[in-house]
Image (spheres, rainbow, N blue to C red):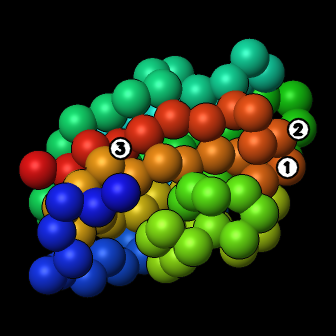
Amino acid sequence: MPLSEENESVRESEVMKNKDGGMMGSSLSAKHVVKYTDTGFVPTALEIASGETVTFVNESGSDMWIASGTHPAHEILPEFDQMKGTPKGSAYSFTFIRVGTWKFHDHFNPSANGTVTVK
């Protein structure tokens, strides 16, 4: 649950995949990276400052769809929702503005989950 709802969160951007499967764009120098693997998210918990961006990188053998809790409605932070699946080698970035602890999961595999705490 959020500690404060004074600020709004905004979607940063989706990072495109080049023809070799590598990432293009700002994610190459991302400060906060969460990897999605065949066994789940690494790390499963992250603490960041308001205004910072987290990049979720798909290193699994299947598509990923990053979304906020609670599955399947994604209602806790609805703007934090990738809205579609992306293949291995792709990434999704989101800039967190609202202070709070935000649950996330892979919409295709809701048992894979984690949290981002924004201070």
Q: CA distance from mark 3 to mark 2?
A: 23 Å
Instruction: Check disc 3: other Cα within 10 Å, few if <14, some if 14-19, many if 20+.
Output: many
Check disc 2 and report its element: helix, strand or loop. Answer: loop
Residue at the (26%, 82%) spot, across then down: 8
- Given the image, on which type of amino acid does mark 2 rest? Ser
Indicate the quadrant where residue 98 lies: bottom left
Check disc 1 and report its element: helix, strand or loop. Answer: loop
Instruction: Check disc 1: other Cα within 10 Å, few if <14, some if 14-19, many if 20+.
Output: some
Q: Which residue is mark 2?
A: 62
Give the side of residue 113 with respect to residue 73, left or right: left
Eye-nearest disc, 3 or 2: 3
Q: CA distance from mark 2 to mark 1?
A: 9 Å
- Given the image, on which type of amino acid does mark 3 rest? Val
Indicate the quadrant where residue 33 lies: top left
Q: Position of residue 82 (x, y in %)?
A: 63, 67
From where the camera sits, is residue 14 visible? no
Indicate the quadrant where residue 29 lies: top left
Residue at the (31%, 76%) spot, across then down: 9
Instruction: Check disc 2: other Cα within 10 Å, few if <14, some if 14-19, many if 20+.
Output: some
Residue 81, placed above or below residue 50: below
Labelled pair 2, 1 in contact (Cβ < 8 Å) = yes
Q: Which residue is mark 3?
A: 116
Q: Residue furthest top?
A: 39
Dot 2 or dot 1: first in sequence order is 2
Residue at the (68%, 24%) spot, across then down: 40
Quadrant (top left/top right/bottom left/bottom right) for the N terminus: bottom left
Q: Which residue is mark 1?
A: 108
